Image (spheres, rainbow, N blue to C red):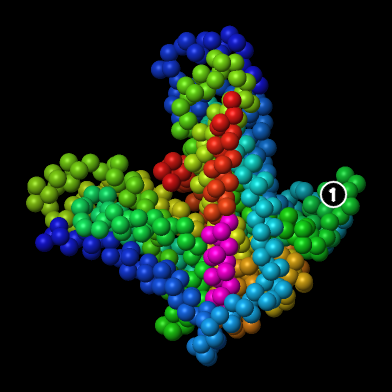
Amino acid sequence: MDLRVSPYLYIAPFFVLFFLFGLAPMFYTAWVALHEWHPIGGQGDFVGLANFTAVLGQGMFWKSVFNTLSIFVFTAVPQLIAAIFIAAVLDANLRAGTFWRMAVLLPYVAAPVAVAIIFSNLFGNQFGLVNNLLATVGLPQVQWTGSSTASHVAISTMVSFRWTGYNALILLAGMQAIPRDLYEAAGIDGASRLRRFFSVTIPMLRPTLIFVIITTTIGNLQIFDEARIFGGASGNGPVGGADGQWKTITLYLWEVGWRQANLGRSAAIALLLLLLIVLIGLINFLAARKIASDTGAKR
Amino acid sequence: MTTTLESRARRATSRSGKRRETFGEARRPGWATYVTLMTVAAVGAFPFYWTIVVGSWTNDVIYSDELTLTVGPNLIDSIRRVLTADINLVAATLNSLVVSTTTALAVVLFSTLAGFSFAKLRFRGSNALLVAVIATMAVPAQIGVVPLFLVMNHLNLRGSLLAVILPGLVTAFGVFWMTQFLRGALPDELIDAARIDGASLIKTFWHVALPAARPAAAMLFLFTFVGSWTNFFWPYIILDSKSATLPVALQGLQSQYYTDYPLILTGALLSTVPLLVLFVFAGRQLVAGIMAGAVKG
């Protein structure tokens, strides 16, 4: 008796709670997306796919898709390169190795909202430190909350600040799992350090790289906090810039659902976001596999 | 940066037994490595320092064309102003503590229970159920935010901390993490011995599995705590100014006083202090946890 039922009892709390607050809402999203739905008034008429066609017909939706992808690229690419570089530097017989690993992880303990407040100040249009430094070296000042590209760079900097060290440690773990005799063998064959890095480290790191790329993608396509805070007055003013220059999909989802009180449409946006995440995750996965195997095949 | 042929040959022929494990190659790296690491660390620490700089001056110093990089005399005054501002940061800190501690403890308990069952007990469908857990790990939680809001509305939990705590009580990652750990760290013989001694299954869990799970449980607690502490999207939707957690209160502070940089940056600084303290004491475990999760994940 004890052994027949107990195993199920032990996993029950997880599955019950996860179903109630994780899985069920996910599926219910599809139901809400097919209806008119108001935060206070509740369920309205069944409208079929009207919410989806309405969203897809909005210029602002496509703008938010563009913004999200742009911020994703600005964040993911430099962050990945920096994380690999930091991991490679940490992958040595360091004195006080744990201290350096902790130092790299420090930004992770700041909440994205706090990071966004700090960086909004650094990227201030008029008196921000970044523009001050640009002026000092004689470069023109940048209106960070003006153009979409400048605002995307600012937001990407915030996201990268928090996550680069974290990802570097994951990659470092992958590097440490590479058998050392591979390096020894490459060394004896006369491969330089750089050559060893590209011919041994990167190919052997493939599974870890794919893992980091996938998790980074899932996170970066849902950016909300930084975009909500950036630019100062995040009270009742425009959301994501005067012209929606940095309105991400998640920010748009929130605005439509809670500013415009249209939960049906908001649910439709959530599902479209899910679709986008799955698509990009798939492309990433295939590309990462291909790139990694190509570099591995080079002789 | 290249090694000389001589040392390379020496390394190839030397016995590897002398090498200290886990810190890469035996050869100590040169000064360039440390300079690089110092630069990386400085870049990571600078925004924190900058927050103190801005918080320690008055607005007219910040809003001048002079470049100020030193700490001024006004930090205590800024802290006092934050604590007496319209936004109640002290209450928000307590709210954050309640939410983060509750969710972290619950995640550890429920994950260890489920992990013990998946790792050590045989039951029909266990593999399929574990695959289901892993499959849901990659699902972005924010997608279900609209129905979650409707459910909480229905339960009259808007503006209640429970609305944030309930969805955070379990995580798929936690179950996966504990299952992996207990598979390796808990020998079947220990369980068998306890069972032969007549201990019930729950006693065995409590006295054998839980102590064995302690290191992984500590890491899971830390990650859940940090994740909960820094969480913004869902709390922002469902909480109000009275029940705000720290990030939500910070957003309120920023939208109300957005021109008063010393004030809002001091708020951001204060909100980070508890996690900085945690980091000083448990940063080592966080590092180990991230690195352990990567190898298995």
Q: Chain of mark 1?
A: A
* Percent coordinates x, y for residue B213 in the rendering: 31, 48
Question: In the displayed structure, would residue A243 be above or below residue A132?
Answer: below
Q: Residue at x 59, y 77 (%)?
A: A52
> Is B3 left, or right, of A242 in this rendering?
left
| Residue for point 51% across, 87% down | A46
A172 is within the stretch colored magenta: no
Q: Is residue A144 left or right of residue B35?
A: right
Vertical comparison of B146 with A184: above or below: below
Residue in the picture at 47% in, 10% down: B13
State the quadrant of the N terminus of chain B: top right
Q: Residue B67, percent across and down?
A: 83, 51
In the figure, is residue A214 to the left or right of A193?
Answer: left
What range is drawn magenta here?
Answer: A265-280
* A248 or B219, nearer to the observer: A248
Question: How many neighbours does mark 1 have within 10 angstroms: few (below 14), some (14-19), or many (20 or more)?
Answer: few
Which amino acid, by three-letter code, is at mark 1? Leu
